[in-house]
Each structure stands twice: as C-alpha cells, then as structure tokens.
Amino acid sequence: MREKAAVTSALESLPEAWRRIDVLVNNAGLALDLSTIDEGDTDDWDTMIDTNVKGLLYVSRTVIPWMKERKSGHIINIGSTAAKIVYAKGNVYCATKAAVDALSQGMRIDLLPYGIKVTAVHPGAAETEFSLVRFKGDTSKAKGVYTGFEPLQAEDVANVVWYCSSLPPHVCINDLVVTATAQANAYYTYK
C-alpha cells in the first residue's frame, strides 16, 4: 500500500474483466505508538502517513478512471472516530484519519458528475490486530484497550460497509460513525 509503483503495477495487471470494480473499500490503515508530538518517532509518522493517506490515494487513483469510464461505482473509505475528535498522543494517527475524512468529501464532489458514490465509514474501538500493531506486539497493552467493555468486531464494521454498498443506486450514505454502545467517541469509553 505504501509503494505507489507496486500498487499501480498490481492493479494494472488485473485482467480486463476484473477491472470492473463496483465497490472499492479502502481499508488499509494502522496506528503506531502513542506519543506527544515532540517525542513521536518520525519513522512511525512516515509509515502511518504512507499507509493511511498515500495508500488510499494510490489505489483510488488507479481505480477511479475505470469507474468514471462506466459512470458508476462506490468508494468506501474506512476512517476512524479519530477523524472526528483528536485524543492525547494520537496526533499523527488522528491527522491521517482526518485526511481520509477530507479526501472522502473531496472525492464525493469530484466524482459527483460520474454517478460514483463515496462513503466514509468511521469505526470506533474494534477488537482487531489494530492495538497489537499500535503497541508493536505488546499483547498486554493491546488487550487493555478492549478490557471492561464490549468493543466492535471486524464483522460489525463489515456489516456496516455491506449495508452502505447494498442501498439503491440513488441513495448514498456520505458519512457514518459507528461505535460500540460503551463508546461515545474516540476519547470517551465507559468501562
């Protein structure tokens, strides 16, 4: 996802019949560590920016012309509640997810004349490998994120994406925030 040439090459090597992509889900994303802006690891910043923002752009840049040619398609960008409210020590991750939110809005405007839908889905705490990656393999820290409440599961988010993509052609959910019942936003969770 982070290497433009590799992404472009992989997608352009698809057989012609497979290039008819009806729904593109831009789901690559990660967070690395929690630190104040003055103590952040710049290599971690590069990885988050390259994956969460540039990866989405590289895939979209290749697929969108195929959708424009057909004047149809649906792009679903997976953001985060972190796009909506910044939390302490999440600075660069939150910024990348705010970028996903802004890119979704811009795509929606740019692709409007082509009948291409653009939806941003912003999940809250979902118990996946996300926290294990954030804490670089520290399983006790990762488990602690989800202790004391029932978080979302990957299947919950997948069901939301499926719902958004299964609506009639004239209906588009532009922006959707989904959290566990115990979560009010990216910062407040009742445990």
Image (tube, grey):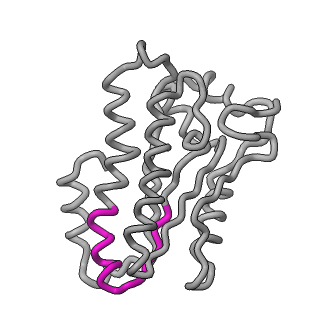
Residue 11 appears left or right of 36? left
Vertical relation: 50 (above or below) 67: above
Q: Residue at x 76, y 40 (%)?
A: 183
In the rendered image, residue 64, in percent from the top left (x then y), is placed at: 32, 71
Residue 180 appears left or right of 44? right
Q: Residue at x 58, y 84 (%)?
A: 170
Q: Which residues are magenta?
A: 60-76
In the rendered image, residue 69, in percent from the top left (x then y), is placed at: 29, 83
Vertical relation: 128 (above or below) 65: above
Vertical relation: 129 (above or below) 1: above
Magenta stretch, overall SS: helix
Residue 135 appears left or right of 167? left
Q: Residue at x 39, y 80 (%)?
A: 113
In the rendered image, residue 61, in percent from the top left (x then y), is placed at: 28, 63
Task: Compare residues 125 and 82 and report the one nearer the observer.
Answer: 82
The quadrant the C terminus occupies is: top right
Residue extending farthest to the top is: 39
Specify whether residue 69 is painted magenta. Answer: yes
Residue 149 appears left or right of 29? right
Specify whether residue 72 is painted magenta. Answer: yes
Task: Compare residues 91 and 20 and report the one nearer the observer.
Answer: 91
In the rendered image, residue 52, in percent from the top left (x then y), is placed at: 40, 45
Q: Looking at the rendering, which quadrant does residue 82 occupy?
A: top right
Vertical relation: 54 (above or below) 132: below
Q: How many marks?
A: 0
Q: Residue at x 33, y 50 (%)?
A: 55
